[in-house]
Every structure is written in C-alpha cells, then in structure tokens.
Image: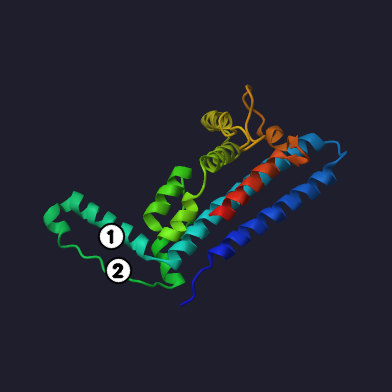
C-alpha cells in the first residue's frame, strides 16, 4: 500500500520557501529607484510573509497527514477514546460499556482523507502548544518525537509569526495588540535575533518586515526560520 513520505513533505516546503525568497528578491531589486519603492517594498514584505506562513500552515497539515498515514494506530486510539468519552457523557456508563471501536491497521490515502479531513479542509493548529498536543494524541512515538524536538524558541517563533499573519490578514486592534505582545518576547539572547521589536509598538507591519539585517530583510528571516523549523519536524 502506497504511503506518503514525510521527507518529501519537508522537501516540498523547503523548496517553496527558496522559490518565495528568490521571487521576493527579484521583485525588490526591480523596485529599486522606482517612485513608489518604499511603499511597494512594505507591501511586498507583507505579502511575502503572508505567503510563507500560509505555506507553513499547509506544511503542518500535510506533515501530520503523512505521519498518520505511516502509522494509523495512535490516531485511532485517540478517536476511540473521544468516542467513548462522548457516549459516556451523553448516555452514561452502561451505554459506554457497549460501544465497540473496530480498529484498522492500514488505510489507503483516499480513505484517510475522508477520516482526517471529511469537509475538505486542511488540518489546523491554533498555536505551537496545539501542535505538540495533537502530536501527542495522534502520532506514533518516532514521529511524535520529531515534533516535540522543537525548542521553546521555535514555539515562540511559530506563535509570533502566526500573530503577524493574523494582523496582516485582519488589521483589527486585537490582532495588533496580540502581535505586539508576541513581538516583545520572541527574541531571547542569541535566539530569533532581529525578529522582535524594541520598546516601540509596531504599527506599520510592512515597514517592520522590510527592515534589513545583514543583507536580509526581516520577512526573509522569518521565512528562513520557518524553513529550519520544518526540517526538524
């Protein structure tokens, strides 16, 4: 039975980030000296960052799908437990004791799609803690260990990037407040350097993301950190 290769999922995301950064640099170079260079660079930095994080969200969904496809037993165990709990809460212990879950060792890819994603949406994760929690519940030990190998610095990067993504997408006051809260703590000593803010709050996220450090714009640095995190997972 054909299995999805997690290494291929990681490679695809790596290549996608390389292509995205190459595109960003080509367009940024083409804008040099143009009348609206600064404003256009700000918008380019925003859209590049947004594309990078959306790709990372899709990567997470594809990776978990591949891991569960490799070993379906852990996911079935969690599903069985949730069904038992639901029946017990609604109908009581007598009914719960009479509910049987027939596990299946192998499922093909189309069948797995119907199980994990019956509505045709990607698997979603609300934050880094949720990624870890679902890895614990759904993944076999070797795959779970890769996800759990992420450091606290990686977790902060993921959650900060998500907060920036939400502000870029929604522009609400609450999303800006959350973004600035995350930006205040994402950098720690040598970790996540140049990815946070100083004392001042960020109001123009495009200007923040186009800032240059060591020849690379901050949007690129975020994309590269997501790429390095994906390689660990």
Task: Name the image colouring.
Answer: rainbow
Please say whether residue 113 is visible from this viewpoint. Answer: no
Q: Is residue 42 left or right of residue 183?
A: right
Q: Which residue is mark 1?
A: 80
Say whether disc 1 or disc 2 marks the residue closer to the N-terminus: 1
The residue located at (23%, 52%) in the rendering is 85
In whole angstroms, how far apart are the C-alphas of marks 1 and 2?
9 Å
Picture coordinates of residue 87, whole percent (x, y): 21, 55
Please say whether residue 152 is visible from this viewpoint. Answer: yes
Q: Residue furthest front?
A: 190
Q: Residue furthest left?
A: 94
Q: Is residue 24 left or right of residue 109?
A: right
Work out whether 176 lies above or below 100. above
Picture coordinates of residue 71, whole percent (x, y): 41, 66
Which of the 4 quarters of the picture holds residue 189?
top right
Q: Which mark is residue 103?
A: 2
The residue located at (70%, 44%) in the rendering is 220
Picture coordinates of residue 180, whole percent (x, y): 57, 29
């Amino acid at each position: 039975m054909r299995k999805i290769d997690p290494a291929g999922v990681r490679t695809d995301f790596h290549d996608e980030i390389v292509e995205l950064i190459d595109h960003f640099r080509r367009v940024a170079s083409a804008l040099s000296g143009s009348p609206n260079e600064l404003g256009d660079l700000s918008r380019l930095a925003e859209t590049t960052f947004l594309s990078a994080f959306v790709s990372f969200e899709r990567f997470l969904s594809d990776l978990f799908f591949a891991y569960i496809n490799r070993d379906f037993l852990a996911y079935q165990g969690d599903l069985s437990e949730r069904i038992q709990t639901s029946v017990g809460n609604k109908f009581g212990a007598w009914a719960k004791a009479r509910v049987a879950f027939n596990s299946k060792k192998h499922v093909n890819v189309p069948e797995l799609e119907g199980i994990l994603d019956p509505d045709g949406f990607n698997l979603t994760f609300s934050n880094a803690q949720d990624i870890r929690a679902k890895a614990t519940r759904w993944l076999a030990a070797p795959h779970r260990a890769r996800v759990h190998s992420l450091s606290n610095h990686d977790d902060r990067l993921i959650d900060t990037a998500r907060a920036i993504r939400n502000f870029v997408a929604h522009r609400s006051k609450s999303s800006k407040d959350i973004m600035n809260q995350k930006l205040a703590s994402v950098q720690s000593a040598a970790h996540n350097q140049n990815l946070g803010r100083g004392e001042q709050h960020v109001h123009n996220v495009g200007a923040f993301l186009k800032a240059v450090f060591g020849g690379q714009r901050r949007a690129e640095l975020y994309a590269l950190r997501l790429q390095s995190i994906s390689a660990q997972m």
